């Protein structure tokens, strides 16, 4: 039994660390998932939506720390109770989502490993069984090494590193891009359904305006700079000033500069008038825009429909223009 508990402890700990790190790499993406859970059609907790990003950062750091604490054998009582309560809650949540078909992907592993609702529930059931084993066989749960007093410093260093990493990816972009719009992807190929799949990796995407669909036209341009902003009213005012020089340089170097947003004509006019931009905006699905660049506004360069570079507005100066 001691061997089984040891294996379960390492397995659960590593899984929590991996799951936490993947979501910490993209906390903004996880906050979008939390907003989906909080929406009226799912849990009906709309009052929590403004706090989604803060909750996302807290949850993923806590999840990662629990994995580290479990492997170390630190704060046994707190760690086991936290794990048990967390997995009971998420098992209920994934069952609810699966049974009532509320959320199509739990976001447990971010965009790195999309899971269907029933796959998510099955994963949580397995974790629940393993955590119950650890909980009821806690006599076999001993510190990984001595002195045990050093464990708190490892946990503290991990916590500090998590905070620093989370801040970095929020102020820039995810360090590892698992999404369908990562650099090097040819968008037209991503819009095709792969063998054995139902939905293509890139869907609900295009460049639309009052004149119609300009998707093919723009994707066949030799050089394009896309200014991406899923919601203009929620965009960072500082960001529009920060990207201004990059937009000007792109126009001077022969790039076709376009905006991509889910906002309406009035909001577009306000942005143009306020910051003096003269490029045309196109409309597409808000969820697709949020997936392209975790920045509002953000920048993306295309060459014949292939994504060459993406930058947060904080890093507009690093944009490479040919």
Image: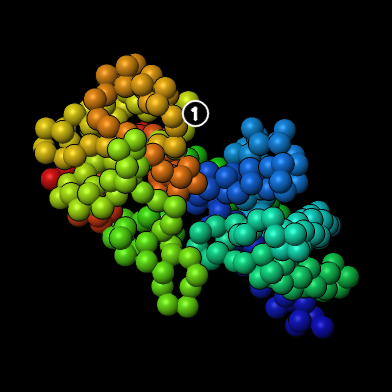
| Residue situated in front as seen by the camera: 56 or 274 | 274
Residue at left offset 15%, top offset 50%: 222
Q: Which residue is mark 1?
A: 234
The image quarter containing residue 97 is bottom right
- Picture coordinates of residue 167, whole percent (x, y): 50, 39
Q: Quadrant of the N terminus?
A: bottom right
Q: Quadrant of the C terminus?
A: top left
Does the image show residue 165?
no
| Residue situated in front as seen by the camera: 172 or 31 | 31
Residue at left offset 75%, top offset 59%: 100
- Picture coordinates of residue 99, whole percent (x, y): 76, 63
The image quarter containing residue 178 is bottom left
Residue at left offset 74%, top offset 39%: 45
| Numbered circles on residues, count | 1
- Residue 221 appears left or right of 207: left
Disc 1 secondary structure class = helix
- Residue 84 appears left or right of 67: right
| Residue situated in front as seen by the camera: 56 or 279 | 279
Q: Residues within 10 Å of mark 1 (few under 14, many from 20)?
A: few
> Looking at the picture, does residue 9 appear above or below residue 218?
below
- Picture coordinates of residue 104, whole percent (x, y): 62, 59
Residue at left offset 50%, top offset 70%: 198
């Amino acid at each position: 039994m001691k061997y089984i508990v040891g294996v379960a402890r390492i397995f659960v700990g590593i899984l929590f660390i991996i799951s936490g790190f993947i979501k910490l790499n993209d906390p903004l993406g996880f906050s979008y998932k939390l907003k989906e859970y909080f929406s009226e059609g799912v849990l009906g907790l709309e009052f929590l939506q403004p706090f989604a990003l803060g909750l996302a950062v807290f949850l993923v750091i806590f999840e990662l720390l629990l994995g580290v604490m479990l492997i170390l054998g630190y704060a046994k009582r707190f760690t086991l109770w936290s794990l048990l309560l967390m997995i009971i809650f998420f098992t209920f949540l994934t069952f609810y989502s699966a049974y009532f078909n509320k959320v199509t992907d739990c976001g447990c592993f971010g965009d790195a490993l999309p899971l269907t609702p029933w796959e998510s529930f099955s994963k949580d059931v397995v974790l629940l069984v393993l955590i119950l084993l650890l909980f009821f066989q806690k006599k076999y749960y001993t510190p990984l090494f001595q002195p045990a007093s050093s464990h708190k410093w490892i946990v503290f260093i991990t916590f500090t590193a998590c905070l620093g990493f989370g801040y970095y990816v929020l102020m820039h972009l995810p360090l590892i891009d698992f999404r369908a719009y990562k650099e090097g992807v040819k968008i037209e190929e991503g819009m095709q359904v792969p063998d054995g799949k139902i939905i293509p990796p890139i869907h609900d995407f295009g460049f639309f305006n009052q004149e119609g669909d300009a998707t093919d036209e723009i994707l066949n341009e030799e050089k394009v700079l896309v200014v991406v902003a899923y919601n203009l009213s929620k965009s960072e005012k500082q960001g529009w000033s920060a990207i201004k020089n990059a937009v000007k340089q792109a126009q001077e170097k022969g790039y076709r500069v376009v905006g991509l947003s889910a906002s309406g004509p009035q909001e577009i006019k306000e942005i143009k008038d306020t910051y003096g931009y003269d490029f045309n905006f196109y409309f597409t699905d808000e969820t697709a825009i949020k997936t392209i660049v975790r920045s509002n506004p953000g920048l993306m360069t295309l060459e014949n429909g292939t994504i060459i570079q993406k930058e947060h507005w904080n890093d507009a100066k690093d944009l490479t223009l040919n």
